[in-house]
Image: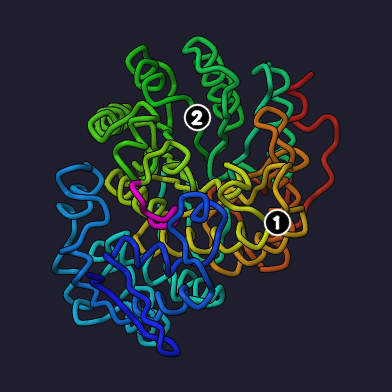
Amino acid sequence: MSAYKHTIRNKVYGFKDLKTLLGKASPYRSGDELAGVCAESYEERIAAQITLADVPLKIFLNEAVIPYEDDEITRLIIDSHCLVDFNLIRHLTVGEFRDWLLSDETDTATLTNIAAGITPEMAAAVSKLMRNQDLIAVAKKCSVITSFRNTIGLKGHFSTRLQPNHPTDDPKGVAASIIDGLLHCSGDAVIGINPATDSPAAVNNLLKLMDSFRYQFEIPTQTCVLSHITTTLQLINEGAPVDLCFQSIAGTEQANTSFGINLNLIEEAYQATLSLNRGTIGNNVMYFETGQGSALSANANFGVDQQTCEVRAYAVARKYKPLLVNTVVGFIGPEYLYDGKQIIRAALEDHFCGKLLGLPMGVDVCYTNHAEADQDDMDNLLTLLGVAGCNFIMGIPGADDIMLNYQSTSFHDALYLRKVLGLKPAPEFEQWLIKQGIVDDQGNMLPVSPSHGILGAMI
């Protein structure tokens, strides 16, 4: 017997449980069809959304999409839920929650105060009832500020991760990309390298390269090599200059197991990184990446739609007070997000849900070369995310990652967004750019001669 149902034109649509209802109500995407959890027709999707709108929020505290006893992420979600913060919205249905979020009375302070009372499934549910403009409008009201050597997420500011990847981790190639990025005002979120190999020795060499460069030019930013968390933990214990600890995470215990991680391991790495005390103005030391489809690709989604699985990963991130979280939205491929339309929708959902849960969300505005998407789609998404108050994006030479072989955003894309929306880099980083003669006090780019100190580092 169906627990949830709705009738359209004398046809009864039944949904056996909350998990099924969430999947059927989700806007269409290829990954949910692949998983067999999406609506079979547009009419069924509308029936599911109407039904979901009438579900009380408190139901989400009693009906888990993955059983409590089977999944440590479910246990984390339930055990860390703040009933005091939830009291303000406990009387609402999902549909009423949408209206409440969009109301003028619900301001930034209110959203900040209730973040711990919202479960990932509540956030995922309400996003399924929202238009793109709704996702943008509410995310814009959210403010999540973090700090390490600079301050990220302030209103009127927009940061970038400088991503100087190289297919062989060649130090000169990496250094050239770092200098190129810095001269284009990129790198205030982090200078972060995806290593070509997870070899501890290679990772340590990259860490030392970035730390030496940062120290030489007194750059108020943080560095990170995005190696596996076990490699980072080993290097911390060996005295390597680790600023941030990185890990890709997913929304189910089984998916995280496929990544070689669990909550105990993340906690160990978190405490080890904190103990280094390398931050100068803050102690947010974790960096997490996520992406819709990761649980399904590991055969670990348990019949849950990919967007709900994605938002469950944010519960993991939230526990460790990260400096940065970003969804690598189009990276997994068209099997999960088929085209530009699906990538744009997923990115706006992820950013909205992350911000609603209190996370410092960024987005890797990206696609793979076999997806039905192009750079115009990414320009559209980039602009929408800027309007929505996204904390940061990636900065990659030419927008083409030559190591990971996918298309993302360039240093110039960030300059464009800052210019058209009147945004600035992190304030400490902005002052450094002015001091270095890279920009003037109005943020305008200045010509840089070959004798400039940073360029001279390559000679």
* Structural crowding at the residue carrying mark 2, measured as other residues with C-alpha within 10 Å and reported as few (<14), some (14–19) or many (≥20): many
Q: Which residue lies furthest to the bottom in this view?
A: 9
Q: Which one is closest to the eye, mark 2 or mark 1?
A: 1
The boundaries of the magenta stretch are: 302-308
Residue 75 vs residue 355, the one in the foreground: 75
Residue 426 in view (yes/no):
no
Q: Give the amino acid at mark 2.
A: Leu
Q: Where is residue 181? Give x, y as percent.
A: 70, 39
| Residue 226: mark in rendering | 2
Left or right of 354: which side holds 109? Answer: left
Left or right of 16: which side holds 139? Answer: right
Q: Where is residue 75? Give x, y as percent.
A: 18, 48
Label 2, secondary structure: give it.
Answer: loop
Is 163 located above or below residue 377 in the figure? above
Q: Where is residue 252? Give x, y as percent.
A: 32, 43
Is 86 located above or below residue 256 in the figure? below
Q: Give the amino acid at mark 1.
A: Met
- The answer to whether residue 29 is magenta is no
| Residue 192: mark in rendering | none
Give the residue at x 67% y 47%: 367
Residue 251 in view (yes/no):
yes
Is 135 located above or below residue 63 in the figure? below
Quadrant, the N terminus: bottom left
Give the residue at x 25% y 31%: 271
Label 1, secondary structure: give it.
Answer: helix
| Residue 378: mark in rendering | 1
Give the residue at x 30% y 43%: 320
